[in-house]
Structures are given as C-alpha cells and as structure tokens.
Amino acid sequence: MAQFVQALALGVLIGGIYALMAGGLTLIFGVLRIVNIAQGAFLILVATFTWWLWRATGLDPILASVITAPLMFGAGWVLYRYVVVRIRGQAASMSVLLTFGIALVIEGVLNIVTGNRFRSATPAYFEQSFRIGDILLPKAQVYGFLAAVVVLGGLYLVLTRTWAGRAIRATSQNPSAAALVGIGATATAALAFALGSASAGVGGSILSVLYPFFPASHYDWISRLLGIVVLGGMGSLPGALAGALILGLAETLTATYGSLQWSTLVFYLVIMAVLLVRPQGLFGARLREDAA
Amino acid sequence: MLTLNDVTAGYGNGGNVLQGVDLHCAERTVTCIVGPNGAGKSTVLKVISGLLRCRTGSISMGDVPLTSLAPDRILAHGITQVPQSQALFPGMSVRDNVMLGGYLIRRDRKLLAARYAAVLERIPIVSERASDHAGNLSGGQRRMVEIARCLMLDPKLLLLDEPSLGLDPRSLAGVATLIKSLNDGGTTVLLVEQNVRLGLGLATHGVVMEGGKVRLTGTAAEVRDHPEMASLYLGGSAPATPAPAGPASVSAGPASAPGTPASAPAGPGSAPATPATPATPGSASASPTAKGVSNA
C-alpha cells in the first residue's frame, strides 16, 4: 500500500512539473494556432543556462527561475514580433516547419557552445528526501513541484483576473469576436507566446535538476509535451493539466509495478485509447470540420 | 453619418465580393440591407468594422476617414458590430463577455462600471445569467448578450448582421424591441437581414444588394413596395411584363421625393402585383435604377 501511495505521490509531483511545461505549449497553440516545436529546445536552452549559472555562482537552479522566466518572456516576445509573426494566418504546418527550424538552431548553437554531453545540476538537496511515514519524497521533485504550482497558479490568476489574460482567453476562444471588441491580435499573440516561453523558463530550470540533459534532449521533451497536449486537447489548459498528471502517474506506476522502460509506452497507449474514443482529446472542443 | 464610396473588397486572393458599393446612413436612422445569399451584405459590415480591408474606395463617418483602419480604431470611433453567429466567448461568463465589450475603456474603471450598470438595466438577461458560461445560453439570449457587449462602448453606429438568425418568434420580438429602443435613444443602426419583412419593418431606410452592388435604396417603405424588389430578391420570379413606371420612378429622385411606385407590397412571400422588369447584374445598365435614391 505504501508503495502504491508513494508511486501516486511521485506521479502527482512529476505531473505538476509536466503540466507547467505543457501549459506553455498549449497556451501558445490556443491563441496563435501555432504548434511550437521549439518549446522542448527552449527547455534545454534554459536548463543549460541554469546549469551554467549554478556552476558559476552557486545559485539554486530552481530559484534561478526568477531570472530565467523574465529572460524567456522577453526572448519569446522578441521572437514572436520579429520571426513568428511572419507566418501569422498561414497553415499550422508552416508553424511546425518554422519552430522546428528554431529548435534546430538552438540545438546547433548549444552543441557548439557547450558541447554534446550530458549535464545535470546537483545542488546539496539533490539526493535528499522528505520522509512522511513510509513515503519518501525527493526534495528536488517537491521543490520543482512547488515552483510549478506557484507559476501555474500565477498564470491562472493572470488569465482570469487581468485584462491581458481576458484578452488572451478571448482570442483563444473566438479570434474574430476578440478583434470586434478591440483586442489587438498581434499584441495578444506576442503576449501569449512570451508567457508560453516564460513557462519554459521555469520548466527548464526545474528540468536542470530533475533530469540529465544534452542539446538533443529536446526531441524527447517535445514529444512528451505534444503527447500531453494532444491527450488533454490542443489549446486547453485544464486538458494539459490532466494530460500531464496522466503521464506522471503512468510513468511512476509503470516504473513501480513494471519497468521504467515501459513507462513511456504505457503513456502512448493511453493516448491512443483516449483518441480512439475522443479524437479531440480529453478537454478539446470538437470543431465543425472534425465532424464533417 | 456613415458613407461608403465606391468600395470594393474581397477575401484572400479571390475576386471582389463588393464591386463598387455606395451607401449612406444618416444619423439616427435604421438602415436595413437586404438581398439574396452571396450579395455581399455581410461583407459590407465587415469592411465597415475593419474585419476586412477594402481594396479600393473610401469609408468615412462624418469627416473622419475610416478606410483601412484596424478594428480597434474603428471601435474607438463609436462603431460596434454584432456578427452573424458565434460571436461570444463560450468558455467565459456572461459578465466577462459583456465586460470585454468595454476593453477599449478598461482603464477608466468608473466609466466601465457605469456602462455595465446601464447595460444591466437595459438588458436584464445579463444580470440574470451573469455567472453562467455564455456557451450555455439559448440563441435568443446569446443575441441579447452580443448586443449588450456592443453597448459597453455606447456606440454611435451599431452594425447588426442578421439579428433574426435562428431565433424563435418571442426572442425575435425581444431583439426587435431592443433595436427600436436603441434607435429611439439616438443610436444609428445598420443591419443586414435575410428576413426582408422583419428587416424593412424595423428600418427607416432600405438597401437592396445583389452581386456585390447596391441595386436599390430608399425609405424602407419605398424599397419594400418597389416592383423590382421581388425580381431582385427572389431571383427573377416576377412576371416578365415590362413595368411602365417601375424602377425609374424611384431612382429619379431623393428618398423623400414622392412617387413610391408599386401599390402592392412585395415582401419575400408575395410577388408584386405590379409587373417588374427582371433585374440581374447584366441588366443593371438597362435599368439605371434606383441606385441614385439616397436615404440621406
């Protein structure tokens, strides 16, 4: 029983972190209808920067989020205004090509600058755990989860309590009606892209502690994130949360009762099963053209 | 108040949907655009609200040029639009939907609160369903909330695209009453309507479009009773016998001029008693018709 509860707790912790990473991806898709393949590369870029910062200054990698999040917010805003905006209104496939190109550039630059080897930030608490009864919760995962919850909570408040957030949600739900109430499409899209990138800023800093990474790790991460987003329903934040928790639980439960090697396969089997029943994902809206 | 001068517009790389539209709405009037499907009625509203840029021609309100302004700039000049359908944000509450209508005045909290209070008073459904998701409303309620959202900017000109679409008779009556009361309060209204009888019944002035052009303008009564109306609107189902006085009598003078031609009403359900010359785009020059009638 303790083993099951431990697996559940770990699954929730990891799921919360996945939710933060996937939340940015689904936010960008919801507003811009852009599949940002570069989101995984953003994570690895930030993880590498965080690792370097930790080595150079001793700054706690998870706390480094307070630096990486605003940096990625600015980088995302600039990237949208000067690069991504050029494909506005074009097919989603064009966004895949463009953002895949951005991911390759990031991977190439990281290879040249940092070299093609595994890294991982290992602060003092790296191998420590909290003990609650028979359950052990690794400190790094708990801190990462707490950071993710704080950021997701903040994102929720921004989206529901501020005019900028309402503009993002309105554009996501009905772009032409948003234009009719005076919401500027470009400014809102840039803000959504910047927020999505900022979430990768926090996610990347957390990742640097929890998972070893190297420049090409972004392929693994973007496939996980896309899996979460597709499972939850493209563009749906609650969907990303649900998909992330399912991935977290699938991984830890499979690793506990089976083998770690099977955990990813189990997740993709869950995706296939869900999509057979709900092609739009758990929380996705069924579009008119889907039904045709 | 609003003037469109020789406006052409189209979608993407396609041809012109509007092929030189001239239109004028005087202050405090209700102008209804009618016409068959594909005539370009909704496109006229889209170019006015800035959702679609016109390719040539000009749009102005009073002395203010509106041509090719972005939608938010056009809103700032007091022009709001209720689109044909699906205009709300379904995952947001009714209150949030209506409040978003005041997006441009969001920094003036007092004004925003005052406008919202005024909207609640005028349209009770907003307070009754304030916390409900807009996606859960019925068609009539949705239409009321869409209009409520537009009122947050206290518009000078309200554009309505087929307000009757999908509404049951009771909802329709509610929407019609609201439009009339808004107009009585000084709001100028330009609406597009497939339901000719309803649209022209509400309106003070009428415009008939066909093939991307304005074919007939005048007072609502003149347009409704015009012998060419059935052939324009119903696609040439009227008798082909030439009309002796027909369209020329309307086009000859201003809207206020005497000479309302037909004696029998020519709504969508009734062919005119007075025979009319079939009017098609090709025959437009043959009947240099009513386009000259202005509702100014």
Image (cartoon, coloured by chain):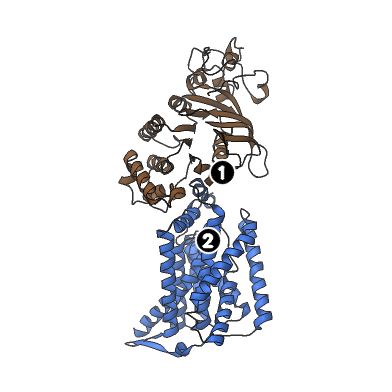
Chain colours: A blue, B brown
Q: In the displayed structure, does residue B185 sit left or right of residue B53?
A: left
The residue indicated by pointer 1 is B51
Q: Quadrant of residue A139?
A: bottom left
Q: Which residue is drawn at 51% across and 25% down?
A: B206
Secondary-structure class at tag 1: loop
Question: Farthest residue in the top direction?
Answer: B244
Q: Quadrant of residue A136?
A: bottom left
Name the spot of residue B19 as percent of width and height, x first: 65, 32
Q: Distance between the residues labelled 1 and 2?
A: 21 Å
Q: Is residue A33 above or below residue A106?
A: above
Is B85 left or right of B239, judged from the image as shown?
Answer: left
For residue B187, above or below residue B263: below
| Chain designation of label 1 | B
**Quarter of the picture holding the N terminus of chain A:** bottom left
Label for residue A48?
none
Count neighbours of disc 1 (C-alpha within 10 A) and say few if under 14, some if 14 to 19, many if 20 or more.
many
Q: Which residue is drawn at 48% across and 29% down?
A: B27
Does the rendering let one see residue A186?
A: yes
In the image, what residue type sits under mark 1?
A: Leu
Residue that mark 2 sits on: A191
- Which quadrant of the figure has residue B41? top right
Describe the element under mark 2 as helix, strand or loop: helix
Please tell me which residue is depicted at 66% across the width and 71% down the height of the picture.
Answer: A104
Q: Tag 2, which chain?
A: A
Q: Are marks 1 and 2 in contact (CB under 8 Å)?
A: no
Number of residue marks: 2
- Can the viewer see residue A226 in this picture? no
Q: Where is residue A287 in the image (x, y as percent from the top left)?
A: 51, 52
Left or right, B131 with respect to A179, comes to left
Q: Is A15 or B270 nearer to us in this picture?
A: A15
Mark 2 is on which residue type? Answer: Leu
